Amino acid sequence: MGESPTLPLSHSIFINDDAAQQAGMEPTMKFSTKCEYGIRAAIDLALRYGQGYVQRTDIATRQRIPEPYLVQILTTLRKGGYIRSVRGPKGGHALTRRPETITLGEMVCLLEGPITPTGCLDNATCELSEDCLLRDTWVEIKEAIERVLYSITLEDLCNKKRSRENVVMYHI
């Protein structure tokens, strides 16, 4: 039995920041800070769903998101139809839908744009698409990522957080 072939580090795709840093490279497949912060803000709102409006400063403090950046993210979430915002001392932000109906995939697409591991999947006029040996693989990767992201709801993430904190929830 021979050893399985390995790619040189310059050809590897790192999903994990630590693995990339150990190899002296930047991660190549990574969601933006805007996306991470936006999802964290949405989870914060989901954890408080049905409890009224949540102040922007409270979200920023709990999630450790710089408030000026959070303002931009909340605007994106509002324009995307995921939150409603009310001004004033009793105002704040709240989800427009129940947390179990909002998927991570929706959030990523709103904050990042289309999910594609390579630009050629968005480009229908790629001159190599008919003969490209990688295209089917890139499509499989894209579909696998979407399958995972669209199978996880904000409520799923809230439940994980609650179970980690061993919070007892009473529903009446």
Image (cartoon, rainbow, N blue to C red):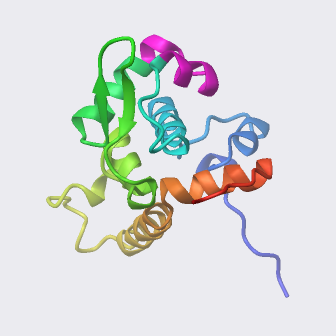
* Residue nearer the viewer, 40 or 24: 40
Residue 31 visible in the picture:
yes
148 up-or-down from 116: above or below: below
Residue placed most toward the observer, 125 or 121: 121
- Residue 123 in the image: state x and y as whole percent: 20, 55
Q: Is residue 32 above or below residue 167?
A: above
Residue extending furthest toward the bottom: 1
What is the quadrant of residue 120 in the picture?
A: bottom left
Residue 8 visible, this orientation: no
Residue farthest right in this picture: 1
Residue 69 sits in which quadrant?
Answer: top left
Would residue 51 appear left or right of 89 to someone viewing this image?
right
Question: Residue 89: percent from the left, percent from the top?
Answer: 39, 11
Q: Position of residue 103 (x, y in %)?
A: 42, 57
* Residue at the spot 51% in from the left edge and 62% down from the top edge: 152
Toward the viewer: 94 or 12? 94
Give me the residue at 38% from left, 36% from top.
94
Q: Is residue 67 magenta?
A: yes
Q: Is residue 13 highlighted in magenta?
A: no
Q: What stretch is highlighted in magenta?
A: 57-69
Q: Quadrant of the C terminus?
A: bottom right
Which residue is most to the front? 172
Left or right position of 152 against 95: right
All told, the count of numbered labels is 0
- Please identify the quadrant where the N terminus is shown: bottom right
